[in-house]
Image (tube, helix red, strand yellow):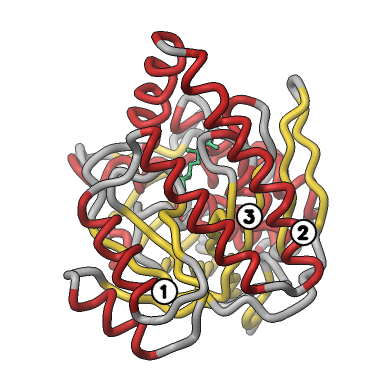
Amino acid sequence: MITIRAPGKVILYGEHAVVYGEPALAMAINKYLYVTARARDDNKININARDLRLAGISVTISEGGDVVAKTDYGAVISALSYVKRAIELAMEYLDKKVGIDLEIRSEMPVGAGLGTSAAVAVATILAYAKELGYDIDKRELSRLAWQVEKDVQGSASPTDTTMATFGGIMYIKPEGNNTVMEPVKPGANVPLIIGYVPRISTTKDLVAMVRRKYEIMRNIIEPIIKSIGLITKKGREALEMGDLELMGTLMNINHGLLDALGVSTRQLNDMVYAARHAGALGSKLTGAGGGGCMIALSDRIEVEKAIELTGGSVLRAGLDTNGATIVSND
Ligand code: PMV
């Protein structure tokens, strides 16, 4: 039996602009998704994932080797799809198909933009491989997990799966079909408080909404996107210098521009402003927006309380530097 954990992530600067070739800065957080795997003697795959609302689901490997879910699970099907595809790709990659019991647990809210689906894909593939006695290179793991996201979602940037695999802080710059990812060394601890509310829009819809605006009024939207790119570059410098005050100021400007693009919501804005008024050095929505998460650069309890008073839930997070790792192996 083996337990693997993979971290979630937040985007410090650059979401949405990264879709237009501008850089983004993402940080893996010390909140984890855990997958425990135990090989079976038969061809059954049992998935127990209360935190993903997949309690007691059982799937079977068909004669052809596909992982077959026998029931229509309605709302949970999308979360299940990541686990199912991850197992299929791991089986294909290792050319080894055995039944397995999987238990999945999350310290993060699921579907809030913290990268839980990527963490599920990474941890499931690694747990399956390790439980069967195989090693898997991190670059291969990251590539396979990105494939899971692309297969399930139709399209996906490699940001979340890279962060869940490698951890740390990465400067991400799309270049044509390639994505350049440079690890960034922070000059200081980056204390983050994460506030979250339920999401009312999907990443896909929000990206499409920004795209429509871009097409209708490119001369207005393009400078906003370019400014966000400049903020990301400056934000990277501030982080490397350990200048938290400058980082906070840049977060505030970044949030204003995301709001201008139309991806913030009343609840996100309430949390963002409440955090600043309670003494955070800066705050912004993180991820695609439309509800979901915001980050505040602070470790103050007053900031947590202020976010909660607006109706948001709170998660305190620091940096994860390990990426996907083995937690226990009996
Ligand atoms: O919803 P999230 O946290 O995965 O963030 C999406 C980030 C976007 O820039 C909006 C989209 C993307 O693919 O980069």
Q: In this view, does 177 lie above or below 135?
A: above
Residue 186: x and y in percent read 77, 70
The residue wearing badge 3 is: 26
Q: Nearer the viewer, mark 3 or mark 2?
A: 3
In whole angstroms, how far apart are the C-alphas of marks 1 and 3? 19 Å
The residue lying toward the viewer, choosing from 109 and 210, is 210
- The residue sitting at 82% across, 50% down in the picture is 182
Residue 16: x and y in percent read 51, 35
**Label 1 amino acid?**
Glu
The residue wearing badge 2 is: 134
Q: Residues within 10 Å of mark 2 (few under 14, many from 20)?
A: few
Tell me the SS state at disc 2. loop
Classify mark 1 as within 8 Å of ligand 1 or not, answering yes or no: no
Q: Quadrant of the C terminus?
A: bottom right
Judge from the rendering whether residue 71 lies leftward or rightward of residue 241; answer left or right: left
The disc placed on residue 3 is none
